[in-house]
Image (cartoon, rainbow, N blue to C red):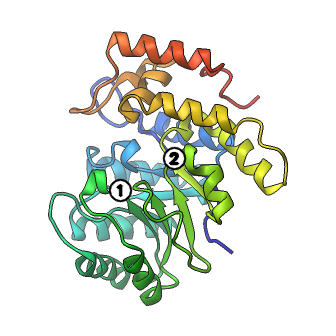
Amino acid sequence: MSKIKGIYAASMSVLNDDLTLNIKKTIQHAEMVIENGCHGAAIFGSTGQAQLVSVSEKINLLNHLTSSKYKEKYIIGTGLNSLGETINLMRVSKSLDFNKFLIMPPAYYKYEDKEVIEFYSKLVQAIPDCEIVLYNFEKLCGYKFSISCVEELVKKYPKNIIGVKDSTYNLFENLKINNFSVLPGSESKLFKGLQLGCSGIITATCNATAKLARKVYDDFNNGNEQTVNQNLCDVRAEFEKYNLISGLHTFFGKNDKCYRNLLPPLSILNSKDEKDIINNLEKLNFSLNNSMAA
């Protein structure tokens, strides 16, 4: 059995006008995506502007997140290059009974599999009972996990290295490890991934597509005909024409202006792109209202 299964959103961070983190709305957003169909949400992944949000604000949110009605459904992203700061944030999370983490290798520096294994080994040695989902996204950190690296980490730490979010897509078709979750980072890979034995997805656009993605997932597991997968893939493709974070914040910003606040150097879409994405999504019969659960 996979340890993490289903539809997960890489949840968004909502900011105040002064660009501080709006704790209440960020948690409400995470709860909303779960209510719309997600099995859970990753807090402070790249979609949540994790690399740009201060450590103190992350800790403040975690202290409030512990009171969420969906506390057991969250994976905590660290979004930090520093080994020491990553360990400290994990310790704070553990003290609040959050045990699952989404962790990407450090960005900027060049390294190979050996160094990656050393990095995660230090994390496990510091937090022996943690559970880690590896975050494979070469475009962001400059490193791409190999199958052999993942296999070695799972071999060394079978109780700690429990899955991988594959946003580089070099793993999900061929990585086969018992009791290990493989979750592609796009709705366009959901159905194929399920056919190949993947556990589900963790994606940015599930903030908006949770309802559709959950139906594809449930229909697959129930042996039903796929009736919305093409629509789901088309919606994902429309968002992919733009920076995903910019597109999502523009989309949600139509109903709540707080979503239009982004930490530099990120920004919402310009007026032309905003008009285009909203119009094109409407042509797909997809809008903020009809993407929400009834």
State the image quarter where residue 16 is shown.
top left
Q: Which residue is drawn at 41% across and 82% down?
A: 153
Q: Position of residue 56 (x, y in %)?
A: 28, 51
For mark 2, give the secondary structure. loop
Q: Which mark is residue 137?
A: 1
Which quadrant of the figure contains the N terminus?
bottom right
Q: Where is residue 164 in the image (x, y as percent from the top left)?
A: 48, 66
- One can see residue 266 in this view: yes
Left-right relation of 166 to 190: left
Q: Which residue is drawn at 71% across and 50% down?
A: 217
**Eyeballing the image, is 203 above or below 209?**
below
Q: Which residue is drawn at 54% across and 59% down?
A: 183
Point out the tag, 1 or 2, that comes first from the N-terminus. Answer: 1
Left-right relation of 242 to 208: left
Q: What residue type is labelled 1?
A: Phe
Q: Position of residue 48 (x, y in %)?
A: 39, 43
**Eyeballing the image, is 77 above or below 269?**
below
Q: Where is residue 51 in the image (x, y as percent from the top left)?
A: 27, 49
**Eyeballing the image, is 257 above or below 12?**
above
- One can see residue 69 in this view: no
Q: What residue type is labelled 2?
A: Ser
Give the Cα distance between marks 1 and 2. 12 Å
Instruction: Tell how many labels.
Output: 2
Q: Mark 2 points at which residue?
A: 186
